[in-house]
Amino acid sequence: MAETETHQHAEPHDEDVHDANYQAPPEKTIEEIMAADQEDESLRRYKEALLGAAQAETIIVDPNDTRKVIVKKLALVVDGRDDMELDLSGDISHLKKQLFVIKEGVQYKVRIDFIVQREIVHGLKYVQKTYRMGVPVDKMTHMVGSYPPKKEIQFYLTPAEEAPSGMVSRGTYSVSSVFTDDDKHIHLKWDWTFEIKKDWA
């Protein structure tokens, strides 16, 4: 079953996900953001452009889902190939069994599709930890940014990464991914697997 609520408490490995010295600014509603600095015309126009339709109406994409951020999909993006996708909108417990095959040495990006509803979210962050035979081998943290509510799916595309290469690097890797934010809300946490091979087959 997918995690259907935003967890407010710290997870056991949150010291790795969140900077203990960083103090996030207080959460503000869209109404509070629009009401502030009304005398600054350029800032007011910037906020109107940023928030779009969300300043005029409360945008709720799924009334049955109380989350502000609904993570829909993760995709591995490689030039010249179809995107390899993980559906994160349903039962995520089976994702470990769904194996991505990646050709050694290729450049790839990770794309995350998500919906923001109800309120603006600040400082979204994607953290990915990679393990081989239970041993941590890589960690990447990407600051995704702040996003207003929209009816459309929004996405974040990481900078290009290079898959490991060489006989020693070939094999199966397990990945723990977390989509979080400045306020330490865990919007979704999931595990998945990929295999580095000499070729795509």
Image: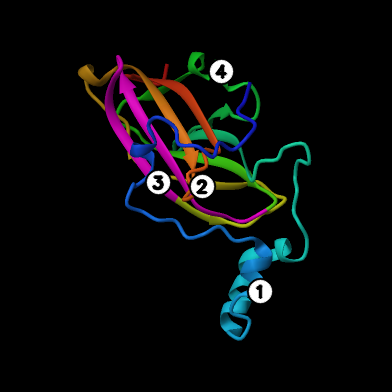
Label 1 sits on a secondary structure element that is helix
What residue type is disc 2 on?
Answer: Tyr
Name the amino acid type tagged 3. His
From the top left corner, tell me how far across and down residue 94 is, in percent: 56, 15
Residue at image coords 37%, 32%: 13
Residue 35, disc: 1
Q: Residues within 10 Å of mark 2 (few under 14, many from 20)?
A: some
Are the residues tagged 4 and 1 within 8 Å (C-beta)?
no
**Front-most of 77 and 149?**
149
Task: Kindly report the distance in space between the C-alpha atoms of the residues bearing marks 2 and 4.
Answer: 23 Å
Give, as a three-letter code, the residue at label 4: Ser
- Image: magenta residue range: 119-143
Going from N to C along the chain, the mark reached first, 2 or 1, is 1
Mark 2 lies on a secondary structure that is: strand
Earlier-in-chain disc, 4 versus 3: 4
- Residue in front for this viewpoint, 12 or 17: 12
User: What kind of element bears circle 3?
Assistant: strand
Q: Residues within 10 Å of mark 3 (few under 14, many from 20)?
A: some
Per the rendering, the mark at residue 180 is none
Q: In which quadrant is the C terminus drawn?
A: top left
Nearer to us in this view, 120 or 100: 120
Q: Nearer the viewer, mark 3 or mark 2?
A: 3
Mark 4 lies on residue: 93
Residue type beneath disc 1: Ala
Q: Name the N-terminal-most of marks 2 and 4.
A: 4
Question: Which structural element holds mark 4?
Answer: helix
Residue underneath mark 3: 142
Residue 108 in the image, given as x and y percentages of width and height: 40, 37
Look at 48% across and 17% down and name the residue there.
Answer: 96
Residue receiving disc 2 = 156
Q: CA distance from mark 3 to mark 2?
A: 10 Å
- Vertical comparison of 64 with 158: above or below: above
